[in-house]
Amino acid sequence: MRITVLTTLVLLMGAPAIAADSPAPSPYAGEESREIKALAPDFIKGLKEGAGLGFAKSAELNGYPGPAHLLELQTNIPLNAAQTQAIVAIRDEMRSASIALGDQLLIVEAALEAAFRDRAIDQAKLSDLTLQAGALRAQLRAAHLGAHIQATALLLPQQIHRYQVLRGYAGNGADGHKGNGHKGGGHAH
């Protein structure tokens, strides 16, 4: 009995050391089969659809409504016919530009993926491809942020406030029609 207890104690004392030697699985485990390993499937889908993907969060959370959400909420804001027509045009232009930029970004990311996969990467190629990808992401972000600026210029302050209430931002520091520099002049061009 004494040997069994002693053996058990020795084994238990050694167990943490054994567990510490086995590495924890990577959070990337399971992503090895992705076509472009660095991009999640939902992100790729969003790029192909011209979705926001968080690119305009700075605008959205600082009182600059986005055109797609404005159109979803148009009867509750409410938007007039001229505003709706102008916002549709802004949304469509932004979506078209975003899809084109997203396609270009996917091409660059695929080239970067292929360069690593094929062991055909060096510092010059790495620098070139990552700079291209970064520039395309910046252009995507600017397209989305710019659409928020354009849409906001068409709204009255009370419409901006109503949008923020409907989106759940009112009272959370996103009271965008006060003091953030945009006029919200209600111009329905």
Image (spheres, helix red, strand yellow):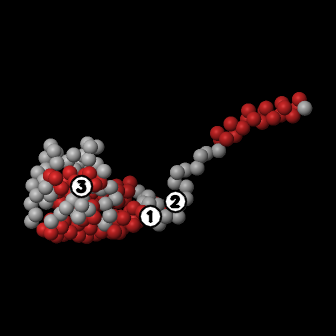
Taking the spot 31% from the left edge, 66% from the top edge, the residue there is 50
Of badges 3 and 2, the one in the foreground is 3
Taking the spot 88% from the left edge, 31% from the top edge, the residue there is 3
Of badges 1 and 2, the one in the foreground is 1
Q: Secondary structure at mark 2?
A: loop
Q: Is residue 166 visible?
A: yes
Q: Is residue 138 visible?
A: no
Residue 74, quarter of picture: bottom left
Question: Are circles 1 and 3 on residues that touch, CB within 8 Å?
Answer: no
Taking the spot 13% from the left edge, 47% from the top edge, the residue there is 181
Residue at numbered disc 2: 31
The image position of residue 66, as x and y in percent, is 24, 59
The image position of residue 42, as x and y in percent, is 42, 63
The image position of residue 117, as x and y in percent, is 48, 63
Q: Give the amino acid at mark 1.
A: Pro
The image position of residue 58, as x and y in percent, is 26, 50
Q: Disc 1 to disc 2, how far (Cα)?
A: 10 Å
- Please state if 175 lies on the left or on the right of 30 as rendered: left
Mark with earlier residue (1, 3): 1
Residue at numbered disc 3: 163
Q: Disc 1 to disc 3, how far (Cα)?
A: 30 Å
- Please state if 90 lies on the left or on the right of 49 as rendered: left
Residue at numbered disc 1: 41
Mark with earlier residue (3, 2): 2
Binning the other alpha carbons within 10 Å of mark 1 as few (below 14), some (14 to 19) or many (20 upward) gives few
Of badges 1 and 3, the one in the foreground is 3
Mark with earlier residue (1, 2): 2
Binning the other alpha carbons within 10 Å of mark 2 as few (below 14), some (14 to 19) or many (20 upward) gives few
Q: Residue furthest right?
A: 1
Vertically, is 80 above or below 17?
A: below
Q: Secondary structure at mark 1?
A: helix
